[in-house]
Amino acid sequence: MRILILGGDGYLGWPTAMALSKKGFEIMVVDNYLRRNLCRNLNVEPLFPLPNLLERAKILKEITGNCISVRIGDCSNYTFLTKTVRDFQPDTIIHFAEQPSAPYSMLDHEAALLTLSNNLESTLNVAWAVREIVPECHIIKLGTMGEYGTPDIDIEEGWIEIQHKGRKDRFLFPRQAGSLYHTTKIQDTDLLWFYVRTWNLRVTDLMQGPVYGFLTKETMLDDRLLTFFNYDELFGTVLNRFMVQAVAGYPLTVYGSGGQTRGYINLIDSIACIELAATNPPKPGELRIFNQITETFTVKQLAELVRKVGRNRGYDVKIQNTKNPRIEREEHYYNPVYSGLQELGLKPTYLTDDTLQRAFKKIEEYSQNIKSDVFTLGIKWG
């Protein structure tokens, strides 16, 4: 199988590319270094130094013999994307090529416009390129559980049957995003559902929860193969940020009451889900949706877990409830269904003290790189 990974330089894209390459798939990654450039320009660079994509691919081949092809370019440029698709002729396209941060999308008008244009144009271009060049190609789009919001009913796996005035039909589950970023992900889903119905495309939409961790079999081969690990307020996911704050001696920043409940997934399982989706494609004309999480936690539960492990490692970890800069419900019902990927064969990697211990150990090796002033940047939704 030839797999084209768009956004192959990112937190998810690079370790996914390495893992699938190891499995024997022919891999090409594409990236325009958007996230690198944003992090550099905003002074929120990742904890680990990262070689560029060409250098990373070279290092991987030297260590393992596995080959990853690289193209540098912008997926919102249709000419570039169509040439790449025509040259590579992928069987599967994994679409990670989006601005991935909710806080960044709420930063200012320029950030909002970049998020909107980049995310929607890249998704539109993928659909058109597949239709024109490789109509049998399977599109795997990374969605987000944030598309659903926090409704007072159980969150089904993408679809819901509704009875109304004596009639019944099946619809996409109602969605209510909490940021502009999440709104663009809803629009991605709507775009692809339209083109599935119109052009008979085959699409898998993975509604993923916040990802944590950075240690996979491939990233542990050599530190130069580590993935993009942010810990700042803009691009750092909550558990990753808490672990770095603990090592830095900075209070864990819990927004509001900390009762916000979300579904989480280890990076290892995120990669496994992508492989399961790729090797079990939907039929033409089908939009298949999975909720890609393995367990749920409140923010304060995550903070307590990090405090416990941090204290066992000798850190005086404190938890600080701060005024919530986001507009969100802090105490709410949350019960998502997430059985589909496990039915395909996912064996969940649950969050344990040992998982946190291993992550702490690697973070400690790079503690001199931590910049505490990026933990709180004052970004407000309202």
Image (cartoon, rainbow, N blue to C red):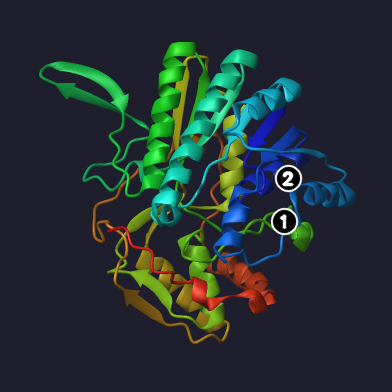
The kind of residue on which mark 2 rests is: Met
Q: Is residue 333 above or below residue 190?
A: below
- Hey, which quadrant is residue 368 in on the image? bottom right
- Hey, which quadrant is residue 161 in on the image? top left
How far from the left and from the top, in percent, is residue 64?
85, 48
The kind of residue on which mark 1 rests is: Thr
- 286 and 111: which is toward the camera: 111
Q: Earlier in the sequence, mark 1 or mark 2?
A: 2
Crowdedness near tag 1: few (<14), some (14–19) or many (≥20) residues, C-alpha within 10 Å: some
In the picture, the disc for residue 219 is: 1
The residue identified by callout 2 is 18
How far from the left and from the top, in percent, is residue 251?
43, 80
How far from the left and from the top, in percent, is residue 357?
60, 71
- 380 and 317: which is toward the camera: 380
Q: Is residue 182 above or below residue 124?
A: below
Q: Is residue 77 above or below residue 104?
A: above
Numbered disc 1: secondary structure: helix
Numbered disc 2: secondary structure: helix
Instruction: Tell me the quadrant of the picture where the C terminus can be found.
Output: bottom left
Q: Is residue 330 above or below residue 132?
A: below
CB atoms of marks 1 and 2 within 8 Å: yes
Q: Residue at x 60, y 75 (%)?
A: 370
